[in-house]
Image: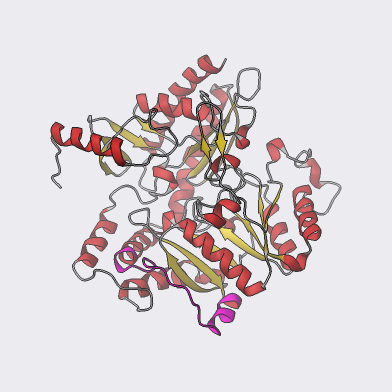
């Protein structure tokens, strides 16, 4: 395709897009065609020539920046050598990608045994749920409120965000939910959402008269109610990537101890937080001495250059699986071109010391966020680590604009704070995510300079002034 499209070509593509594609988040009548014609570094370019600073790196996935030259070169080289190879056969790229993850990145943690690649993070979650049930021979899985785990059957069954469970929501108020979702065997524990504790406690006061956090006690109560010998796994993000909740410091270690005490596996969903997003290679590493049994990866493993996910198994689980013939296969698992992209991405990340770079960017961004909070009374909370930040917004009287918050279902003609900010930011040259409804989700790339970070925050500063006038 030519690098420069004519207006006639753009008009024709608009027709194809509007007539044939099944669009998400809007009805056919609500859809507004927006064509991206290129992307580079921290910016995406629209068909009308507008350049937008991508301050959420797509869906928190373009960690190495758009069109990273090292990744591009790796893909081009692989295309000169390969087409398709199914996962029953090895390729040099898959072998190298595996070594980079298992030895260079995870080796020091001394827990990972084997890895299997998939074509997406959702598939990785499905694989993790399958393995957990195969290994334990137990039917039940416990997730948490406000958790996000993907869009496939098992993943949306583990979803703690009702508005993200594959629903259809009409402007008139009708909501259609997929029959049988959540599927049988999925249960939920309270989220460690300290600012608005769902079980009525206040942190850190809640820790002063008990050995464990109340939300951990609630999780144990759920386990005991079901019967520990019926629970295959607890699936939990170390940091909530869409729910945008950073648990208290002691939460992860207490959860890990609880699952081990009851012989239950922990599936650590790192699809959104993995590969330096939070200033560590993986978010679980923020808790000393904690390691998972199963870990899902995606997004950052390839900086979204191609569709890749994966499941990493502990040595104990790998040893168990090694004794059996695993009767599953997926067409695109370990695709050589995708593996070349993973290899190039990880080589680049290692060469720039991605976790330390993200941590330093996070320190800069955190300081800018604090300045923003002092200036804008609509900001009631700022949480973040590395290149994953959340800003919670309120009206001037302290009330939520969307009272349902993370239980929000997008029916009717409702403007959420995050959507308002996203629309106003786009007018000023910046793209950001629109969920959760009362919270802004920010996630710049590893290539973002301090100047880029300041540009993004300055735009946000202007937009929040407009938000305060709008929200009251």
Q: Residue at x 15, y 31 (%)?
A: 7
Specify the quadrant of the image occupied by residue 423: top left
Give the magenta-colored segment's residue range.
317-338
**What quarter of the picture does the C terminus occupy?**
top right
Image coloring type: secondary structure
Can you say whether 420 is above or below 231 in the image?
above
Foreground of the two, 163 or 364: 163
Can you say whether 129 is above or below 372 in the image?
below
Q: Is residue 405 left or right of residue 77?
A: right
Residue 115 pos. (x, y %)? 48, 71
Residue 276 pos. (x, y %)? 47, 54
Specify the quadrant of the image occupied by residue 320: bottom right
Foreground of the two, 1 or 340: 1
Foreground of the two, 442 or 410: 410
Residue 451 counted in the magenta span: no
Residue 253 pos. (x, y %)? 69, 58
Q: Residue at x 61, y 65 (%)?
A: 291
């Amino acid at each position: 395709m030519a690098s420069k499209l004519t207006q006639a070509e753009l008009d024709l593509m608009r027709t194809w897009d509007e007539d044939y594609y099944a669009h998400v988040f809007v009805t056919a009548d609500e859809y507004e065609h927006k064509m991206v014609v290129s992307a580079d570094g921290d910016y995406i370019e629209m068909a009308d020539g507008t350049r937008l600073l991508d301050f959420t790196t797509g869906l928190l996935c373009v960690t190495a920046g758009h069109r990273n030259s090292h990744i591009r070169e790796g893909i081009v080289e692989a295309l000169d050598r390969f087409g398709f190879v199914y996962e029953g056969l090895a390729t040099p790229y898959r072998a190298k990608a595996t070594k980079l993850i298992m030895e260079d990145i995870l080796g020091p943690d001394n827990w990972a045994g084997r890895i299997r690649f998939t074509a997406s993070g959702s598939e990785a979650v499905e694989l993790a749920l399958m393995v957990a049930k195969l290994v334990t021979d137990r039917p039940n899985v416990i997730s948490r409120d406000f958790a996000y785990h993907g869009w496939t059957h098992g993943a949306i069954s583990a979803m703690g965000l009702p508005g993200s469970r594959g629903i259809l929501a009409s402007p008139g108020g009708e909501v259609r939910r997929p029959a049988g979702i959540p599927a049988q065997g999925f249960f939920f524990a309270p989220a460690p959402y300290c600012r608005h504790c769902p079980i009525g406690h206040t942190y850190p006061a809640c820790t002063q008269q008990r050995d464990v956090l109340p939300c951990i006690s609630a999780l144990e109560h759920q386990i005991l109610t079901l019967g520990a010998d019926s629970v295959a796994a607890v699936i939990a993000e170390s940091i909530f990537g869409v729910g945008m909740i950073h648990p208290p410091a002691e939460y992860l270690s207490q959860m890990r101890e609880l699952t081990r005490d009851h012989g239950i596996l922990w599936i650590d969903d790192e699809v959104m937080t993995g590969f330096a997003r939070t200033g560590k290679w993986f978010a679980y590493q923020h808790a000393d001495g904690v390691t998972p049994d199963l870990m899902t990866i995606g997004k950052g493993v390839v900086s979204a250059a191609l569709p890749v996910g994966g499941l990493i198994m502990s040595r104990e689980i790998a040893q168990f699986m090694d004794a059996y013939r695993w009767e599953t296969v997926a067409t695109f698992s370990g695709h050589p071109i995708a593996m070349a992209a993973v290899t190039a991405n990880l080589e680049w990340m290692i060469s720039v010391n991605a976790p330390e770079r993200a941590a330093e960017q996070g320190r800069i961004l955190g300081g800018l966020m604090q300045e923003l909070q002092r200036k804008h009374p609509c900001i009631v909370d700022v949480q973040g680590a590395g290149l994953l930040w959340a800003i919670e917004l309120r009206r001037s009287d302290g009330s939520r604009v969307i009272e349902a918050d993370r239980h929000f279902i997008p029916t009717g003609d409702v403007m959420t704070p995050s959507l308002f900010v996203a629309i106003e930011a786009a007018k000023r040259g910046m793209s950001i995510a629109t969920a959760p409804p009362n919270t802004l989700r920010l996630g710049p790339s590893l290539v973002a300079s301090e100047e880029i970070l300041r540009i993004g925050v300055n735009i946000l500063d202007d937009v929040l002034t407009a938000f305060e006038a709008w929200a009251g």
